[in-house]
Amino acid sequence: MFICFRPAWAQEKAYTYEVKEVGGSPTCTQLQQGDATKGGALRIEVTLPPGSTLESASLIKDKTSSVVAFPPQGMTQPVGGGTLAVLTLERQRFGDLTPAFLQLQVNTAGAVSPPFNCKTAAGDPVAFFDKEGPATPTSASAPLDGRALQYWLAQGPTLKTTLLGQLKALDGRERLLLVHLPSGAVAAPMENSVAEGQWIQVAFLLPSTETLIPKVTSKNCEAVNTFRRKEEAAPDEDAKQGKPDENPQGSLKSDEFKLVPVEQMFRCGAGSLSYEIHPLPGYVGKGQDNGTAVATGTQSSPQVDVFKTRVRPRYHLAATAMLGFDTATSHRFETDPSDILQEVKDREGLSVYVGAVWMIGGVDYEAMETQNYFLNLFAAVKPTSPTEDAVVGLALTPTGSLSLALGLSLHKNTRLTNGYAVGDSFTGDGDIPTEKTWKGVRPGLFLGLAIDSNILDALTKRFQPAK
């Protein structure tokens, strides 16, 4: 058992928690509700069982589930065989005021417990900070981030063009930059998703005098599917890191920023992408996100921002159905009233074909590229005679999955057998003897409307509002 309480000298009533082992797992219940902290820092004293230490301590915001970790310097472990540990957290680090749970991990004889929440007896979160005073972060990096963002908005196109050109000169690859400010916050504007298979490079906007590099770890995403069909819709080495300038913004001029690539480039399959951002300690600020990003922390990293975004699927193959006009000539044989064999020629005319369309290079229906409108090869057959009538060509696609099919139709030729020829007298019984052959194949021009099996996804993603 250990108890969390405030020292007797504090003016506000202390928060007190009790942790017990229940069924082999630690549980923590609040015994006394403290006064909301009005000062600049939160202080919690934790009495641990003898021989135990705090592995981690965090505040978990109830509404957003974002994690605000107590930094290593805010976790004072018991000394000299004692049992008292002290937690401190600056108010500005907590960010927007909202009730939160205290979450702990305890290390006892080398065994680390899973994270567990300290709640009230009713299971409710706790308001650790009062509404008085600043409710938003005012960390030292905030002015630097603001200046960096202003510089980015003015000089971003030039910085991106220069860096992308330098990287392409090394390996010839096109890349998408995901840019972060010195604190790790997103450098707006940034797209809310990336395309499957697109090469991605994370970069930081840092003061030009900075010589150290932040790091990005634990890049998590799906493997790239290099040939996606409709039915499939579905840790790196650390960079060098150290302590930056004590006052990085003190000698900084408003135009002295540089764009620095961080870690290896990577690419992802459809689904979600996330990675951990480790800003340099002097630039730590409030974690921000491009959809979902939460601040976490460990004893070895004062702050970790988890960046998350969506990866859009890229399709390569789909089933297709086509209805259109076929100009090919069909041949059949019949007899006149005198039983003389005659050849009759007709147009194939209105025809239905089914088959597959290959989107060369893949298509992202939310961000179609120029080649996606015309570089789509199809092959199809008549469902009533799949071994005798086929068509191949290009699908011209003004919008995803709806195409104008333009192609060459190929049909088996019909010819007389058993020694008969046009003009002969037919003396046999039953049907005129004929055969189908690819010799003398009958070509034609096919023009029609094609709809492929991605139609629902294509229309939904084409017209849905941006997320």
Image (spheres, grey):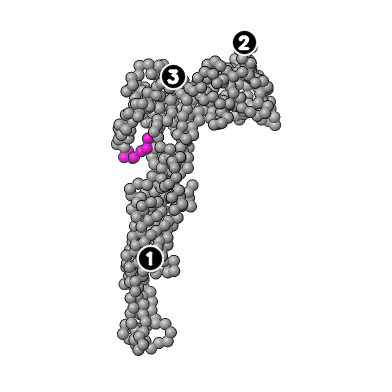
Residue drawn 43% across the image and 25% down it:
183
Taking 371 as reference, is 446 above or below it?
Answer: below
Residues marked 3 and 2 touching at CB (< 8 Å): no
Q: Is residue 444 left or right of residue 365?
A: left
Q: How would you rate the neighbour count of disc 3 (Cα within 10 Å): few for under 14, some for 14-19, many for 20 or more? A: some
Q: Is residue 103 left or right of residue 309?
A: right
Q: Which residue is mark 1?
A: 390
Residue drawn 43% across the image and 22% down it:
142
Q: Is residue 176 magenta?
A: yes
Which percent across, then down, holds residue 26?
Answer: 66, 28
Visible residue check, residue 21 = yes
User: Magenta region: which residues?
Assistant: 171-177
Q: Which residue is mark 3?
A: 140
Asked whether 269 or 122 is in front, the reply is: 122
Residue drawn 33% across the image and 19% down it:
253
SS type, badge 2: loop
- Residue 417 bears which disc, if any? none
| Quarter where residue 389 is shown | bottom left
Taking 164 as reference, is 328 above or below it?
Answer: below
Q: Considering only order in the chain, which callout, 2 or 1, is on the residue closer to the N terminus?
A: 2
Distance between mark 1 and mark 3 Cα atoms: 70 Å
